[in-house]
Amino acid sequence: METDSYYEIGSSHKICQDYCISIQEDKIAYAILSDGCSSSKDSAIGACLLSILAKSVILHLKDRIAIDSSSYISNFSNILISKLLDLQNSLNVSSNVFDATLLISIIEKDYFMCFGWGDGFFISKYYNDHTIIKDISYYDDAPYYPSYDMDSSRRLSYQSTYVEKGFITRASTCLDKDGNYSFSNCTQINNCMSPILIANDNIRDIKSITLCSDGLKTYYNDDDKEKKKLNESFIIPKILAYKSTKGEFVTRRMLRLKKEMQEANISHSDDISCTTIIL
Amino acid sequence: MPSLMGKNVTETHQTLHGFNFSGAKIDSLGASKYTIVTIVQDTSTSVGNYSKQMEETLKKILEACKKSPYSENILLRLVTFNSKLKEIHGFRELNTIKASEYDKILRCQGMTALYDSILDSLEAMESYGKRLVSFEYECNGILFIITDGVENDSTITKSPSEIKDAINRIKASEESIESLISILIGIGKDKNLMKYLEDLKNEAELNHFLDMGDVTSDNLAKMGEFITSSISSTSKNIVTGSSSQLQF
């Protein structure tokens, strides 16, 4: 297996609030992505800390609970929130610092699972060169952050503002080996205040799994006066077109893509992050 | 014929003018950015007087570069030349090169195929650089040619203008390395030789000429430090996007 991660700042930001890591260790590989809320102070640091804490929880649960266990996500969540509260106390900061999405992919033995808090993309590429893209989006673009579980008043506020009104959308799109749409469907679940299961399956036919932040939706052509957003199906095949899959393969691809996009006068307004595990 | 460090981890190629070179297999390289470095060392008969000191200097350069924060982004090739060219090793990651590989490598006998050594190195960097870029690595390069003599035995390269053509080809290509610095280093106290080498640098449009002066421990140490810091500075530029200048 090979893993790599990459993040870069968007044109409308002063600092990059996306962060991601990916690690392959003995018997387990995982990728973690966190996208800080742009209106929350210091969420760039929060995104980084969340990712590191998530890593520690994964390692804590390794050999204790199998990832295909029905209690994995709830156990993960409980431990993470506990660690977040400890960290908040020791740093003496507001929970707003941790206003960030948190998406996690784990591969253990023959099984993978992707779950998390917040919006973003989960992309799986298969040996038949088909690509399935799952786009997770929240009502009113307001994802549920794990930080809301650190403060009951924030949790209640989110509940009254969003949960009773909206839903989470999981749009799945399949691209064939030529990048053409093959099928798409869309499921909606009630907006909830807990991590959601995004995908899980046997890894048998899978070539790679990738997590991306919702910054993929913010590419636009500089020459377009209206700055209309380009569809992510335009950019995703390019992100996955690795020339080789050794070492910093995601970084190489994204740096080259950045150059190609600059030459085509295409930018992205939000930060983007991308982390891939090659099986 | 280049020596191969291990068939499974290297690839070999031929350049435009038929020079052979080797390098680490592209798909084995882990970083996203590399500085490709070539050190070309004169091994004509006159160098025999200080070959041991020169070997020690090369070892010190290697060990010092390994300590650079950007050591993982450096690929080093070492070539020696007298009447013939010899690739001691191709473009390799520093952590795969042991200093002991530089023991007794400078067999100093023969004349000075200076032009061929420079063209060989430039074309190898051009070709390997193209390979790296085609696999989406970002890449710059730095070349050091260390000599104490004048050209008198090249068989392929007839004039400095062919070297200049190679440099211009690399500069013009969008498919090869982003930037290439070439430094001709003259060793010795012969002022006429230094004048010759400076003229060669100008005719061939190499970037810099450095007169290291007479062969003394101090001068060899300074040369080693200069080469090390130049490699480090060049690799810092590709890794961080900075544009620090070489310190002469």
Image: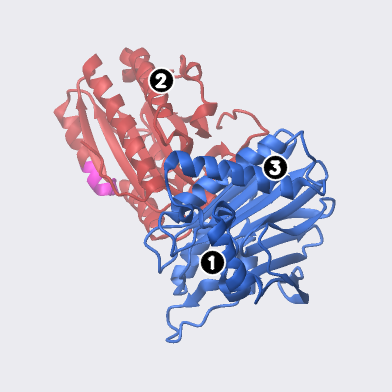
Chain colours: A blue, B red
Give whichever of B7, A94 is nearer the camera: A94
Q: Which residue carries the number 3 mark?
A: A29
A131 relative position to B187: left or right: right
Is A142 a magenta residue? Answer: no
Residue A239 picture location, percent across and down: 60, 62
Check the residue under mark 3 and report the chain it is in: A
Q: Which residue carries the number 1 mark?
A: A215
Tell me which amino acid carries mark 3. Answer: Ala
- Looking at the image, is B187 positioned above or below residue A123? above
Secondary structure character of the magenta stretch overall: helix
* Alpha carbons under labels 3 and 1: distance apart: 24 Å
* Numbered mark located on residue B59 in the image: 2
- Mark 1 vs mark 2: give the one in front: 1
Give whichever of B216, A110 is nearer the camera: A110
Give whichever of A111, A131 is nearer the camera: A111
Tell me which amino acid carries mark 2. Answer: Lys
Magenta highlight range: B199-206
Give whichever of B36, B51 is nearer the camera: B36
Residue A23 picture location, percent across and down: 63, 41
